[in-house]
Image (spheres, rainbow, N blue to C red):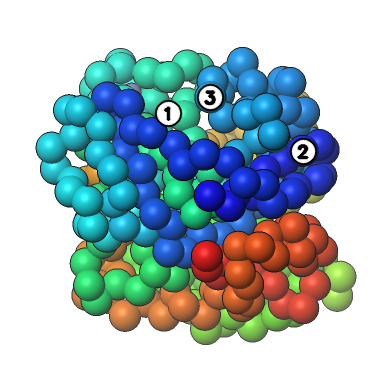
Amino acid sequence: MLACLKTGIGKTEMKDIPIPEPGPGQMVVKMSMSTICGSDMHFLDEMPNEVLAPIFPGVVLDQGMLQGHEAVGTVHAVGSAVTNFQTGDRVMSACITSCGKCNECMYGNYGVCTGDGPYGRPLFGCQGEYYLVPNAEISAVKVPEEVSDEEAILASDILSTGLGAVERGEAGYGDAVAIFAQGPVGLCATLGARIRGCGLVIAVDTIPERLEIAKKFGANVVINPNDEDPVMKIMGLTNGNGVDVAIEAVGTQPTFQGATQVVRRGGTVSSVGIYNTTPMLQMPTLIPSFTHRRIVTTICPSGRERMRRMLDMIRYGSLGLDRLFTHRMSLSECSKAYDLFRSKEDGVLKIAITP
Ligand SMILES: [Zn+2]
Ligand SMILES: [Zn+2]
């Protein structure tokens, strides 16, 4: 089968590799649509294969490292002990798979499962004609007919993560919310704030196309830091008090700092970005910045039941998520897709990749 493999830092190549075989509890899915995510860029551009190989066993092959953790497809083969799926079922899996047995899973925190090690077990290989889903019974779900491939893929990570930031921040009816960064996850947080009944929703990003979509997803005010200072503007919009919840959705020090500066006393900073190149975050610890605020973090909430709920939201809720897909390419063009995604040019958000 054809698969996109990482052959060096920042470098991908299409290679012919064997179709994976499902072990106990696993299944192999024939990909019908895949896409690239910001987390793929961290793996690709920042982390050598030699570092990743021991952390995620089986993911770095002789030819390179399997790429991609967001996909939808049909079941090709199931391993022993998988009873709830059959060949031909249309399925998607949470981007982080869960063992269902570890301490974290017992608490229902499937996204921080440690059953396969301290780093969890993201899906890998979704940018290939076939991909392996570990812990399939706990992590995957059938996709209802009414839900498109594009929507199902978004449910597997982006939607669940963006909404997770809103939920963990406990943003609700009438709350003022500011979302720093409007990539796919930030846009889903904006959408989540709106559908959870928040009041003033403020979206911050430097890319005008993204701010336009933010308005469609329910942002009342959009701020481009290239034009105006977001902290001053947000404090002005909230009578100098700050917002109830500020969400950080890209994973940088300046956006995190911005989020901590615009939260009212007693409010919440909800951090959901991946800080791969920022191993240590700084924040002011003196009153009133630190002790009078709450800080929460989120990684993609996962697990089969969460995925079912995400799909039902889409199925019955007319969320208009399709507008996040800005480009279409074939699997053979994966390297080109990575270049486009990295450039953030041409209004790119999500790229639908089909075999
Ligand atoms: Zn992702
Ligand atoms: Zn677990």
Label drawn at residue 7: 2
* Amino acid type indicated by mark 3: Gly
Quarter-wise, where is residue 46 in the image? Answer: top right
Residue 247 point in image, percent of width and height: 57, 53
- Say whether mark 2 is within 8 Å of ligand 1: no
Q: Quadrant of ligand 2?
A: top left
Q: Which residue is mark 3?
A: 58
Q: Secondary structure at mark 1?
A: helix
Query: Of 180 and 25, which appears nearest the observer?
Result: 25
Do the residues under discs 1 and 3 have CB atoms within 8 angstroms? no
Report x, y in % for residue 37.
Answer: 60, 54
Q: Secondary structure at mark 3?
A: loop
Name which quarter of the figure residue 54 lies in. top right
Q: State the residue position of label 1.
A: 112
> Which residue is pictured at 74% across the width and 49% down the height?
13
Between residue 179 and residue 126, name the one nearer to us: 126
Distance Cα–Cα, label 2 vs label 1: 28 Å
Residue type at mark 1 is: Val
Residues at circles 3 and 2 in contact by the CB criterion of under 8 Å: no
Question: From the viewer's perspective, is residue 111 above or below residue 305?
Answer: above
Q: Is residue 264 in sight in this rendering?
A: no
| Most distant residue in the left direction | 83
Q: Amino acid at mark 2?
A: Thr
Seen in the picture, residue 270 relative to 48 is either above or below; the reply is below
Q: Please give the name of the residue rendered at 31% of the width and 49% of the height, measured from the top-left corner.
A: 76
The x and y percentages for residue 60 are: 63, 28
Q: Nearer the viewer, residue 254 or 163?
A: 163
Q: Residues within 10 Å of mark 3 (few under 14, many from 20)?
A: few
Counting from the top left corner in percent of width and height, residue 187 is at 55, 67
The mark closer to the camera, 1 or 3, is: 3
Give the SS element for disc 2: strand
